[in-house]
Image (spheres, rainbow, N blue to C red):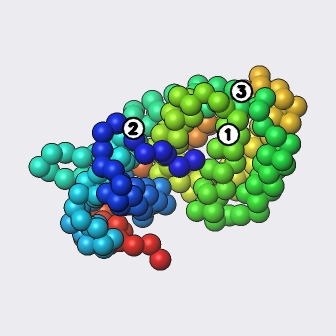
Amino acid sequence: MSPSPTPGAGPSGAAAVASQRVADHLRAAILSGELRPGARIMQEQVAAQLGASRLPVREALRILAAEGLTVVKSNSGAWVSRMDMAECEGVYKIRERLEPLALAESIPHLTAEQVAELETIARQIELTTDVDRFLALDGRLHLLTYSGCRVTQITAMVDRFWNTTQHYRRAFARLAGDSGWELIHAEHRLIIDAIKRADTVDAERFLTGHIRRTRLELAQHPELFTEEDHDNDHTADAAGPAD
């Protein structure tokens, strides 16, 4: 689910379109792993590479900061947000409670076509061993399960926490191994089966365990939260136009 423009005062017209274009580009770079947690975002280079002025770049960084994806410091610069282990664990604990609620609110409103699509996506996930494709499909699957939720405050929080933990889901997928992938597939099947039965209790229970297992696995790898990321030159390259 793509975040909506941040409400409140801000640029309008052509400036707003330019800001959103830059924000979309940087968001995609962050979520794809091109820009890693802790990477510095060089505003002048982003503006030059995207053919934009500094103003829409600054506004784009403000949009992404509101989504939790960047940190902007006055007279200092902008960086991709990063978490320490305690922060990541805290966000995952919130997700363990928030996303099952979103799922329970969503299930009564999912259509038969959407449920069939979930089964198709789950089969596609089971056929891939590519981490990036897995992440894209896994995101489609879970966000589709929440798409029937009509409480916008819940879905907005789901989007935010989903995006801010993307880097750590990528790390988890790389750590999983064959047995871990099989367990992921089995948990997906259990969640979808509960959705088909309209059993919100089982669906919440299976999803809670699914998210909790990722949290516990990440806790076994503190090195993921201390590694050094991109230097400035590398960051500037990563922020350039996508292929």
Callout in the foreground (2, 1): 2
Q: Nearer the viewer, residue 89 or 220?
A: 89
Taking the image as shown, residue 217 lies to the left or right of residue 73, namely right
Q: CA distance from mark 1 to mark 3?
A: 11 Å
Secondary structure category for the residue under label 3: helix
Observer-side mark, 2 or 3, equals 2
Q: Is residue 42 left or right of residue 110?
A: left
| The residue positioned farthest toward the top in the image shown | 201
Q: Could you tell me which residue is drawn at 22 percent across and 61 percent down?
A: 54
Q: Earlier in the sequence, mark 2 or mark 1?
A: 2
Between 66 and 39, the one nearer to me in the picture: 66
For residue 189, say whether it is visible.
no
Q: CA distance from mark 2 to mark 3?
A: 28 Å
Residues packed near mark 3 inside 10 Å, few (<14), some (14 to 19) or many (20 plus): many
Q: Residue at x 53, y 49 (%)?
A: 2
* Residue named by callout 3: 104
Q: Amino acid at mark 2?
A: Pro
Dot 1 corresponds to which residue?
A: 147
Between marks 2 and 1, how big is the CA–CA gap? 22 Å
**Where is mark 2, residue-wise?**
7
Q: Is residue 10 above or below residue 107?
A: below
Mark 1 burial class by Cα count in 10 Å: few <14, some 14-19, many 20+: some
Q: Look at label 1 and name its amino acid.
A: Ser
Residue 56 at x, y percent in the picture: 29, 58
Determine which quarter of the picture holds residue 242: bottom left
Name the image quarter holding residue 208: top right
Give the number of the disc on residue 129.
none
Q: Secondary structure at mark 2?
A: loop
Amino acid at the residue labelled 3: Ala
